[in-house]
Image (spheres, grey):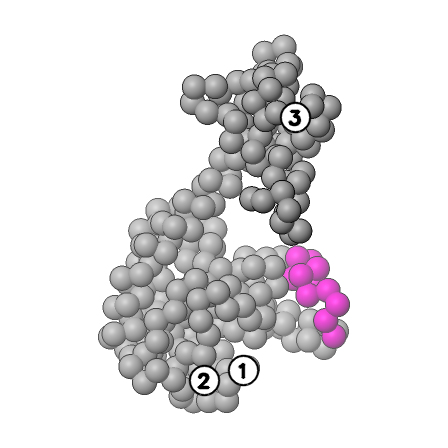
């Protein structure tokens, strides 16, 4: 990145460059070695290393003068790999859902108080999906968002929605209470009249909800067959992610 880039954050660039200095050939390094590799002063390295240790991206080893990559690097790497794996695993089942029911198919994840759309598969009419990959909509106003909020506690929901009108928060909590005990969530369009969606959760191998899928169509109700197919598709994707359904 150019030094003249007005949007570049030098401290962040320095931290990322420092992390990349650790390689299979040099898994452990001292501050002096890092300063030499990066061509910066030891004081600058000290501040960067201290911050990375505090955040878990580096671990001190041996006598405390050597450092190696920490578990936070693995968490970031796993998050990237998991998201790539999820999209690859979900694509074909979602296509089958879309083709079999002729409802638009979507996959999304929670991004703060919003739902972030990662897959969009429009139905044949081309009118059943107004969002695009990368679109962000309020989680409380979408079927997928409401599914993803079920993994939150009430205090977490309140913190997430802080600043919104009290009536909106209480309405969201009332829906959350009902959504938690249902296998799917049906939502009548908050952004487009006559648009109806049904969503179901995607679980990972730990049993955590990591994403949601939905089927959407311009209609005034969700047929039971579509709801069953959305749930079955979500469970198929979850199993491919290592999830095992709890024994009855």
- Of residues 8 and 169, which is closer to you in this image? 8
User: What is the C-alpha distance between the residues marked 2 and 3?
Assistant: 57 Å
Where in the figure is residue 3, as x and y percent of width and height? 63, 42
Q: Residue drawn 31% across and 54% down?
A: 89
Along the viewing direction, whichever of 31 and 225 lies nearer the viewer? 31
- Other residues around mark 2 within 10 Å, as few (<14) / some (14–19) / many (≥20): many
Check the image and report above or below for 42 versus 73.
Answer: above
**Front label number (3 vs 1):** 3
Where residue 213 sits: x, y (%)? 41, 66
Q: Quadrant of the C terminus?
A: bottom left
> In the rendering, which numbered label is found on residue 121?
none
Using the rendered image of the protein, determine whether residue 186 is visible from the camera's viewpoint: no
Corner quadrant of residue 72: top right
Q: Is residue 247 magenta?
A: no
- Residue 157 x/y as whole percent: 65, 62
Residue span colored magenta? 154-165
| Disc marking residue 195 | 2
- Residue closer to the observer: 70 or 47: 47
Q: Check disc 3 and report its element: helix, strand or loop.
A: loop
Residue 160 on the magenta span: yes
How far, Cα to Cα, is label 3 from label 1? 52 Å
Q: Is 159 on the left or on the right of 199, as rendered?
A: right
For the residues bearing labels 2 and 1, Cβ distance under 8 angstroms: yes
CA gap between label 2 and label 1 equals: 8 Å
Res 40 label: 3
- Mark 3 Cα shell of 10 Å, populated few (<14), some (14-19), many (≥20): few
Numbered circle sitting on residue 191: 1
Which residue is at a point 63% across and 22% down the rendered structure image? 35
**Left or right of 241 on screen, residue 155:** right
């Amino acid at each position: 990145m150019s030094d003249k880039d007005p949007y570049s954050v030098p401290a962040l660039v320095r931290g990322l460059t420092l992390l990349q200095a650790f390689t299979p050939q040099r898994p452990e390094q001292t501050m002096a070695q890092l300063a030499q590799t990066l061509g910066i002063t030891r004081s600058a390295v000290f501040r960067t290393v201290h911050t990375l240790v505090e955040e878990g991206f580096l671990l001190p080893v041996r006598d405390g003068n050597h450092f190696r990559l920490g578990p936070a690097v693995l968490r970031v790497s796993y998050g990237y790999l998991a998201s790539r794996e999820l999209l690859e695993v979900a694509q074909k089942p979602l296509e089958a859902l879309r083709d079999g029911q002729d409802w638009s198919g979507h996959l999304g994840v929670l991004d703060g108080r919003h739902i972030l759309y990662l897959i969009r598969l429009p139905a044949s009419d081309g009118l059943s999906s107004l969002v695009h990959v990368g679109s962000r909509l309020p989680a409380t106003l979408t079927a997928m968002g409401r599914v993803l909020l079920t993994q939150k506690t009430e205090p977490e929901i309140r913190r997430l929605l802080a600043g919104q009108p009290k009536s909106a928060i209480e309405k969201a909590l009332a829906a959350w209470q009902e959504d938690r005990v249902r296998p799917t969530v049906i939502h009548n369009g908050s952004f487009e009249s006559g648009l109806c969606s049904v969503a179901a959760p995607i679980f990972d191998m730990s049993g955590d909800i990591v994403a949601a899928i939905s089927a959407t169509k311009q209609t005034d109700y969700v047929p039971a067959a579509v709801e069953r197919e959305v749930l079955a598709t979500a469970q198929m994707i979850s199993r491919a992610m290592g999830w095992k359904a709890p024994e009855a």
